[in-house]
C-alpha cells in the first residue's frame, strides 16, 4: 500500500466515523425547528463563504478520488508530519460529536438561532462559545497535513477565516436573543479557545 493511499484511507475512515453523527443531528434539528434565514449573515458572507467552502470541498474530494488531479498544489511534507494529521483529525471529530450532543436541537448552519432555541453552556460550551469553529480549525489542520496540498490548506483556511469573521454577527444576534445572560456568558468564556483564568 502506498503512503498516499494510506493517507486517503485514514481521511475516509474519519469521515465514515464522524459524518453520520453530524448528518443525524442536522436532520433532527431541521425537522424540529425548520429552516432559518441565512440573509442575516449579510451579503458579503452569502457571496463568499459558501462558494469558497464548495471550492475547498471540491479540491479535497478531487484529492481523495485521485491525488494526481491535485498534484499541482502538492507540498513536500515529511511523512511523520503528514501522519500528525490523523490524531488531530480524530480530536476534531470527537469535539464535533461532543458539540453536536450538547447543542442538540439548537443547531443551525447560520448566525440566527432557531425559534425556541436555548442558551447552551454545558459540554464544550462551558469553556468556549464556538466549539464547532474550533473543531473546524482542527479539521483544516488535519486535512492540510494528511493531503499535503496547498490548495486544500489555503481554501479551507480561507473558509475558516470567513467563519471566524462571521462570529461577530452571530454573537450580535445571540445578545439580542438572550440579552445579559449571553453577555455574562461571553465574559466567562473564550470565543474559540478557553480563557486562561
Image (cartoon, grey):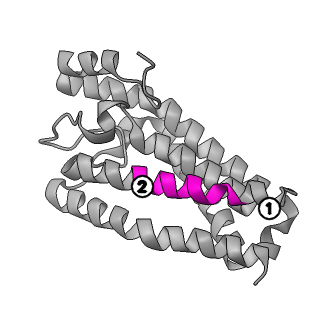
Residue 63 falls in which quadrant of the image?
bottom right
> What secondary structure is the magenta-colored segment mainly?
helix
Q: Earlier in the sequence, mark 2 or mark 1?
A: 1
Residue 143 falls in which quadrant of the image?
bottom right
Residue lying at the far front of the rendered structure: 80
Q: Position of residue 93 (x, y in %)?
A: 45, 57
Residue 85 on the magenta span: yes
- Tell me which residue sits at (74%, 58%) in the image: 82
Nearest the viewer among 174 and 22 is 22
Nearest the viewer among 184 and 50 is 184
Which secondary structure, mark 1? helix
Q: Is residue 62 visible?
A: no
The crowding category of the residue bearing disc 2, from other C-alpha atoms within 10 Å (few below 14, some 14 to 19, many at least 20), is: some
- Tell me which residue sits at (62%, 76%) in the image: 9
- Say which quadrant the C terminus sits in: top left
Q: Position of residue 115 (x, y in %)?
A: 15, 43
- Tell me which residue sits at (69%, 75%) in the image: 6
Residue lying at the far bottom of the rendered structure: 1
**CB contact under 8 Å: marks 2 and 1:** no
Residue 94, label in figure: 2
Q: What residue does disc 1 label?
A: 79
Between the C-alphas of marks 2 and 1, the distance is 24 Å
Q: Position of residue 133 (x, y in %)?
A: 46, 41
Seen in the image, is 11 located left or right of residue 118?
right
Residue 82 on the magenta span: no
Q: Which residues are magenta?
A: 83-95
Which secondary structure, mark 2? helix
Q: Is residue 71 visible?
A: yes
- Tell me which residue sits at (41%, 37%) in the image: 41
Q: Position of residue 124 (x, y in %)?
A: 33, 39
Residue lying at the far left of the rendered structure: 116
Amino acid at each position: 500500500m502506498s503512503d498516499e493511499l494510506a493517507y486517503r484511507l485514514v481521511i475516509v475512515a474519519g469521515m465514515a466515523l464522524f459524518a453520520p453523527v453530524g448528518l443525524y443531528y442536522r436532520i433532527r434539528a431541521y425537522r424540529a425547528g425548520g429552516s432559518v434565514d441565512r440573509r442575516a449573515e449579510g451579503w458579503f458572507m452569502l457571496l463568499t463563504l459558501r462558494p469558497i467552502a464548495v471550492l475547498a470541498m471540491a479540491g479535497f474530494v478531487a484529492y481523495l478520488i485521485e491525488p494526481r488531479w491535485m498534484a499541482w498544489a502538492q507540498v513536500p511534507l515529511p511523512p511523520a508530519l503528514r501522519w500528525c494529521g490523523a490524531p488531530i483529525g480524530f480530536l476534531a471529530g470527537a469535539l464535533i460529536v461532543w458539540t453536536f450532543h450538547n447543542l442538540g436541537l439548537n443547531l443551525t448552519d447560520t448566525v440566527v438561532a432557531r425559534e425556541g432555541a436555548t442558551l447552551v453552556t454545558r459540554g464544550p460550551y462551558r469553556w468556549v462559545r464556538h466549539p464547532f469553529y474550533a473543531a473546524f480549525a482542527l479539521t483544516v489542520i488535519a486535512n492540510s497535513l494528511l493531503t499535503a496540498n496547498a490548495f486544500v490548506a489555503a481554501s479551507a483556511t480561507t473558509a475558516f477565516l470567513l467563519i471566524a469573521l462571521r462570529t461577530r454577527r452571530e454573537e450580535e444576534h445571540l445578545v439580542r436573543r438572550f440579552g445579559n445572560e449571553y453577555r455574562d456568558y461571553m465574559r466567562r468564556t473564550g470565543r474559540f479557545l478557553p480563557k486562561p483564568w
